[in-house]
Amino acid sequence: MKSPVHRCRDVEHGRRQAGDRAGVSCLQPEQRIPISKDVITSSSASAMWFIRDACGIVCAIITWLLVLYAEFVVLFVMLLPSKNLTYSIVNGALFNFLAFLAIASHLRAMCTDPGAVPKGNATKEYIESLQLKPGQVVYKCPKCCSIKPDRAHHCSVCKRCIRKMDHHCPWVNNCVGENNQKYFVLFTMYIALISLHALVMVVFHFLYCFEDDWTKCSSFSPPATVILLIFLCFEGLLFLIFTSVMFGTQIHSICTDETGIEQLKKEERRWAKKTKWMNMRAVFGHPFSLLWFSPFSTPDHGKAETYQYVV
């Protein structure tokens, strides 16, 4: 008796694979039935994840150095020389708390498996072991030879297929995908907040120094103080704009349940449409709580659910 018929679809190149190549029969089904993503899941989901990409590593180090520079200027140029102890303590505690959350979010976004599917598992033996029913669909990537669920795309940097891949971000040296999108959103939000906070403190410090003696408003010389503040102002303004835009686009992408790649390629929607609130809960966890804003909380990403498609 013949094994259940299913179809292998080359998503990246848009061509059908012949049955003798894939090792299975490849026919055109009348109905597209999805396979649960729990069947095709990453074996490294709980393991340490790190992409060995030189450009990404350099960008990540630059990110940390920029945050450290902001810390240095805020603490040693503006807050410690201040005569107002309450002002220094409150702003110092707030800035350091937000900076800590930003770095933690960055590390979680960088070291979390974004949703990679097993590499090289598109073999005849493995496909037959799935015991597919007639009409079921599997997808094969010709670049990493993996079976992947729908809405997964191949990343040339990670060299893997990533579930719900939005884009590859060199600043976090990782793809933004199903498993780490929350941390990337939190990273952009906290960087935007510390940038805004630093800009406000720079403005107040300039006003304070103009009214008072420049030699008394900082432990550094006046020229050095001005240069350090101008660089911090430029850095804060640049990253406030950049991360605010990224934060907005990510929230929009989550609410519409359409990744950046899907929007760019204008891919046809083959998954069930859900409310914006349901999409937010799928990324940040449910129900709503302060854990949404914590980079140390791991949401379930709707693992109990399966992808649904429009027939």
Image (cartoon, rainbow, N blue to C red):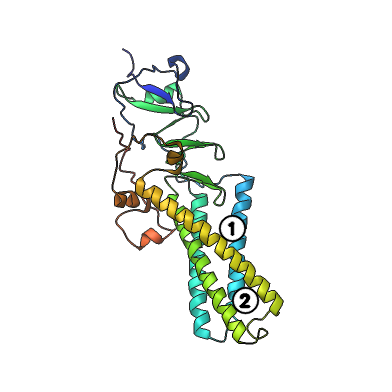
Asked which quadrant contains residue 83, the reply is bottom right
Q: Is residue 268 left or right of residue 159?
A: left
Mark 2: which secondary structure? helix
Q: Is residue 210 positioned above or below 149 on the image? A: below
| Residue drawn at 66 percent across, 74 percent down | 226
Task: Report x, y in % for residue 125.
Answer: 43, 22
Question: Which of disc 2 and disc 1 is earlier in sequence?
Answer: 1
- Residue 63 - label: 1
Residue 124 visible here: yes
Helix, strand or loop at label 1? It is helix
In this rendering, the answer to whether 230 lies above or below 208 is above
Q: Quadrant of residue 6?
A: top left
Q: Amino acid at mark 1?
A: Thr
Q: Which residue is mark 2?
A: 76
Dot 1: few (<14), some (14–19), or many (≥20) neighbours within 10 Å? some
**Three-letter amino acid code of the residue under disc 2:** Phe
Q: Position of residue 101 (x, y in %)?
A: 48, 63
Identity of the residue drawn at 61% across and 68% down: 232
* Identity of the residue drawn at 51% across and 50% down: 111
**Considering depth in this image, is 207 or 4 the residue closer to the camera?**
207
